[in-house]
Image: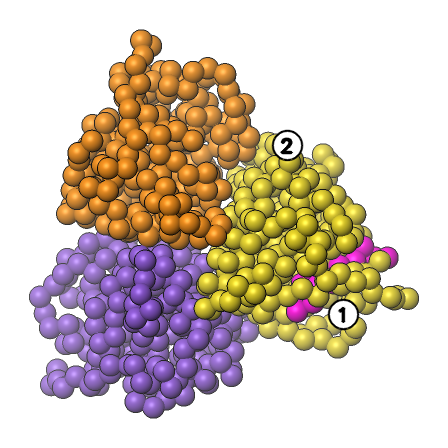
Chain colours: A yellow, B purple, C orange
Amino acid sequence: MKNDLLKRVRQAQPIVFNIANRVTPQVVANAIAYIGASPIMGEDIEEVPDLVKIAQAVTLNLGSTSQRVQSVMLAAGKAANAEGKPVIFDPVAAGATPLRRRRAQELVAQVDVTIVRGNLGEIATLAGFDWQAHGIDAGSGQADPALIVKKAAQQLKTIVVATGPSDLISDGQAIYRVDNSAPELATNVGMGDALDGLLGAFASQSKQVEEIAYAAASLPVAGELALADGIAGPADFLNKTFDHLANLTDAELSAKIKLSKVENEG
Amino acid sequence: MKNDLLKRVRQAQPIVFNIANRVTPQVVANAIAYIGASPIMGEDIEEVPDLVKIAQAVTLNLGSTSQRVQSVMLAAGKAANAEGKPVIFDPVAAGATPLRRRRAQELVAQVDVTIVRGNLGEIATLAGFDWQAHGIDAGSGQADPALIVKKAAQQLKTIVVATGPSDLISDGQAIYRVDNSAPELATNVGMGDALDGLLGAFASQSKQVEEIAYAAASLPVAGELALADGIAGPADFLNKTFDHLANLTDAELSAKIKLSKVENEG
Amino acid sequence: MKNDLLKRVRQAQPIVFNIANRVTPQVVANAIAYIGASPIMGEDIEEVPDLVKIAQAVTLNLGSTSQRVQSVMLAAGKAANAEGKPVIFDPVAAGATPLRRRRAQELVAQVDVTIVRGNLGEIATLAGFDWQAHGIDAGSGQADPALIVKKAAQQLKTIVVATGPSDLISDGQAIYRVDNSAPELATNVGMGDALDGLLGAFASQSKQVEEIAYAAASLPVAGELALADGIAGPADFLNKTFDHLANLTDAELSAKIKLSKVENEG
């Protein structure tokens, strides 16, 4: 696959407005900056319209939900919709508690989300499918993952990016699979949140599903490059992955990505 | 000392629900994930009962106290008590301000805490002994440290883990000392908070005081392994320590731990 | 330039009370600890007077502004003024939204700030000059940077530290330029916030403008030392820079600093 999306992001230097969680904002901000975009965060509802105005994408994260943050996220999402700017939503641990599920569903009901990014369990929960969550981890379910992702995309009217040992990306019609992965991406808390931020940067340049799959591969490809260097453990992995992310070129990403289209009749 | 507590944690993959402070949640979450457990955080009082329900341990941190967070911590602690799940409490800087001391004492008065983890000054303050604090650092006092820890454990009816150049662990009867240490653990902000999270994971498997001493040694032993590698400075130390923590085995921990029982008549 | 300010900081071990933003508190706290000072954070307005009392400097950051945090910052700033303790203020992204500009201006109007630290755009905005911001980045303007900094210092009645490819430092009379820099300081989110914390530690020992210029050079000099080691990317750079910061001596800083006095008639 040949693509120049990374180059386009670096030329555009889009501002990504993040309403992040309280745990991982530093890695989210750094990931966005490392890829060549510009992160901004803020939670005062009064300035939300202005922050959306200067941003080229908005990323929303359910991780540290509260009634107040929910209001801010809804306002940011609606403002982004009004301005035609992409909205990325991460339903963190949506299956872990009824409150999170309700808030996640409220958000997708009221905001026109461009990309929902989560693990398979979060995606399944958000779309109302049966799933057994394990805290912030994926948990387990029985249906065909590719079909879950496709049907969730149809139902939610978004692109779905479900990350895990393999990533599945669908716009409700086509399904792509990215087979790049590194187990240490799951050991480091916040790598999904970081990817949300990256997807914000990429989605400011393209909402085409195959390009989003290409974008989603940026982090696991960087992780594979880190593994190829040899790592002493998950902290060393994180540093090396982020360095490879910063140095990643379209030529390298295009060469390393293991992208395939999933045949389906769903 | 032979023990298989690390293995038990990794097999159980306990979920540790953290009400962390605003400064160090990323290192807390990573430490828990690196040891093989699963962190979850949340602060909406409405979902506290549900988060306690899915968790195997609850860790509470006074670092970013507010009336709101205090209410959430009290609710989480009481819910954990009702379900018989271990509660770890860290009275961060309890001696630094009257407000913190009052909130810390309110928490131990209303919640049945399994382990209190702090530096010697925080422990002394919480138990009402005389101590001169220095911000978030330990400060200095005159009484025999082992006796302070034992009497604090008796008074608070918990296991006390007092960390510093040596760690002292007591359930109010026995006193254990762990002589593993690395000065860079104090230079990196949040290592105590990370240990709180680890103790949550370990305490989900055992509340036996000698095993808690073994658990408390996991981080300083990892630190000593980092020092043995050679470090360029405290940031390099942190990465190497966390990598050793992730790779640590019971065989290694049992071989490296410098654990002794303190004779006492207190 | 010969100076022993680093040594003085390490001997005094000042406590720096930070009202930080939600994104970068970990790097701020670590930077302060690495330089040999002691960070403390807190946001409960009830304990602000007590935290100011035990601190030797107060650092305020606009990054995660809200009405509540603004009240806490105003209270902390006024308490520091009452006790004659230095106040460092960082008007993060002051030019990005009207709300931030208003809050930043309210703060400098009500608090006697010792040092304002920002990029040139934030400084220009705070002082009311014309400037085009780009999110949290500096953006661009047309006036002479040295003159902007000097005039801003005059108008705000503070020392201004404007950081960028070159740093400019002025007390409204003299202007100093520090030509040490590393581009990766801008790629890593929070390096400015970290410098704010360091300036708090330094300002507890000196408010003399040339010494503040020396203090401001600590981070870019550490960055240059990291670059001289060779770096794999921005994450590796961050670790190495922080290690050099922790190991930095006055002899090394004095030898490496590229400090010059800017001739001016403004």
Q: Residue at x 43, y 31 (%)?
A: C165
Q: Nearer the viewer, residue B53 or C52?
A: C52
Q: Residue at x 51, y 82 (%)?
A: B12
Q: Earlier in the sequence, mark 2 or mark 1?
A: 2
Q: Is residue C20 visible?
A: no
Question: Are marks 2 and 1 in one subunit?
Answer: yes
Q: Residue at x 27, y 74 (%)?
A: B161
Q: Nearer the viewer, residue C117 or B160?
A: C117
Disc 1 residue type (three-letter): Pro
Q: Is residue B260 visible?
A: yes
Residue at image mark 1: A145
Q: Nearer the viewer, residue C107 or A241?
A: A241
Residue at image mark 2: A53
Is C122 rendered above or below residue A9? above
Span highlighted in magenta in the image: A162-173
Packing grade of label 2 (10 A; few <14, some 14-19, many >=20) is some
Chain under disc 2: A
Quarter holding residue B218: bottom left
Q: Position of residue A112 (x, y in %)?
A: 75, 46
Residue reaching furthest to the top: C265
Q: Position of residue B166 (x, y in %)?
A: 21, 72
Disc 2 residue type (three-letter): Lys
Quarter holding residue C112: top left
Q: Position of residue A56 (x, y in %)?
A: 66, 37
Query: Do labels 2 and 1 touch, CB within 8 Å?
Result: no
Packing grade of label 1 (10 A; few <14, some 14-19, many >=20) is some
